[in-house]
Image (cartoon, rainbow, N blue to C red):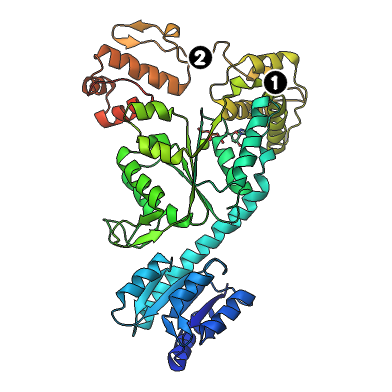
Amino acid sequence: MTETLLIIEDEALLGSELARFFGKRDWEVTIAQTLKQAEAHLSKQDIDPLVVLSDMNLPDGNALDFLERIKDKTGSNEWVFLTGYGSVADSVRAVRLGAYDFIEKPCELERLNLLVEGAARSARAQRRLQQQAAAQSSRHTVDALIGSSPQASALRSMISQMARVPFSSLIISGETGTGKGLIARILHCTGRRAQAPLIEINCAALPRELLESELFGYEAGAFTGAKKRHRGLFEQAHTGTLFLDEIGEMDLDLQTKLLKAVEDFRIRRLGSETEIAIDVQIIAATNLDLVQKVEQGLFRGDLYHRLNVMSLRVPALRERKQDLDELVPLFIADSNSKSAKNVKNISQRAWDMLKRYDWPGNIRELRNVLERCVLLATDENFPEQWLQLPNISSKPAAAQTQQTENGIFLPLDGSLSLQDMEKYLIQEVLNRTDENVTAAARMLGTTRETLRYRVQKYNLKCKN
Ligand SMILES: Nc1ncnc2c1ncn2[C@@H]1O[C@H](COP(=O)(O)OP(=O)(O)OP(=O)(O)O)[C@@H](O)[C@H]1O
Ligand SMILES: [Mg+2]
């Protein structure tokens, strides 16, 4: 698709040379010789340039002042500046204002072309994000949070209230599968920043270095493998929301850096000297007890307080089983439409089983179990035999496991989830090694680092 390039340049000769050059490269070029002309185009929106290539000093003013003034009014585009020789201060300011890059005049056209191509890629990515945001907003209203229990109603009204105020950060806590991700999306999509991007990252999914470079971005050459400049998630979320999922798993070191960023509203790409102002709202989610982690020295207290401007605790499904009345038919209908089934009769026995169970995996577990049942259904009746819910509560309980001297007995009747088994296994080995991680790691055939990560994850006690 032919995209528009707006060139702001008062030197007629240079302007037409650039226009010719980019015209041949599939750009639809518009030239403005003054800022006034440029503003007329941008504010009338008769063109929607993907990239703006601008001289620094125009007859009617400085292009950086201009960018600062109209930044929020133009669509989403990237700016590349042509600067005079040695104007370092200008270039620093350009980057601070969010310009894609700058290049000194006179410059080789091929080099300029590379920059413009990079800017175009980045602008396209931003536009895609915005489109996704718009598509998401329609789905994520507060009514997407289903449930008639008093707890669910209270959650909905809290979410509505919070979405109305411009909070800078918020922590959502709750067990796995309770709907924290869903709530984060509703908060963004019904809030003041709905038109801007919602950027999500799972802090537990990436190793520390990768998480850092993803969050803060980097300059080309910042480390081995950093071939091109990369805008971090903070920058991508600018004016929108950054959703930090599983924040409790973030490395302490990186927490320090995060704290600085959220306090100063500034970040610095790895390998860069220049700080960039960012305006993001942070939603952090955790299924760990952060207060306890702070007490154990595993989470920074100051970061916790900084993020915990507002907080929302999502109750476990077992605390609001009344919600099953709406959730079960909803998920069955969902699965019906996905698998072309028509399950609609749920026996009293099936309801009893659903209500008796504790749902340690909460709403996600419920959805998965129901999906399995619908898939295996042969007629309109809900196949309760496929529920396969254990009768006992599935909290890890040592009483349900037996031990022998050289091994451990783990029941395979569904009473322990895989995670619970792992936790139990590690706990048991730590007990046998007098809480010595090195010895425990040897016994489990793993490294100390891996084991220590899991010890932290499950809040277990160890000595070294
Ligand atoms: N009240 C609800 N109404 C409808 N769907 C829900 C509700 N709560 C959760 N869900 C759905 O259940 C699934 C799990 O929710 P979600 O992923 O938001 O949980 P989570 O708390 O983020 O879990 P985790 O801690 O594992 O990341 C999602 O598909 C979500 O849309
Ligand atoms: Mg989640």
Residue 43 placement: quadrant: bottom right
Residue for point 39% across, 21% down:
422
Q: Is residue 175 left or right of residue 336?
A: left
x, y percent for residue 370 = 65, 27
Whether residue 457 is visible: no
Circles 2 and 1, Cβ within 8 Å, touching? The answer is no
Residue 64 % position (x, y) = 44, 74
Q: Quadrant of the C terminus?
A: top left
| Residue drawn at 43 percent across, 67 percent down | 97
* Residue 23 visible in the snapshot: yes
Residue 118 spot, x, y in % from top left:
42, 68
Q: Nearer the viewer, residue 305 or 317?
A: 305
Residue under label 2: 415
Report how many numbered discs are placed on residues in the image. 2
- Considering the numbered disc 2 on the image, is that residue within a helix, a strand or a loop? loop
Other-residue count near label 2 (Cα within 10 Å), few / some / many at <14 / 14–19 / ≥20: many
Quadrant that contains the N terminus: bottom right
Q: Residues within 10 Å of mark 1 (few under 14, many from 20)?
A: many
Nearest to the observer: residue 451 or residue 248: 248
| Mark toward the viewer: 2 or 1 | 2
Seen at 32% across and 38% down, the residue is 252
Label 1 beta carbon within 8 A of ligand 1: no
Question: Could you tell me residue 159's position as x and y percent?
Answer: 61, 39
Q: Quadrant of residue 393?
A: top right
Give the residue at mark 1.
383
Q: Amino acid at mark 1?
A: Pro
Amino acid type, mark 2 = Ser
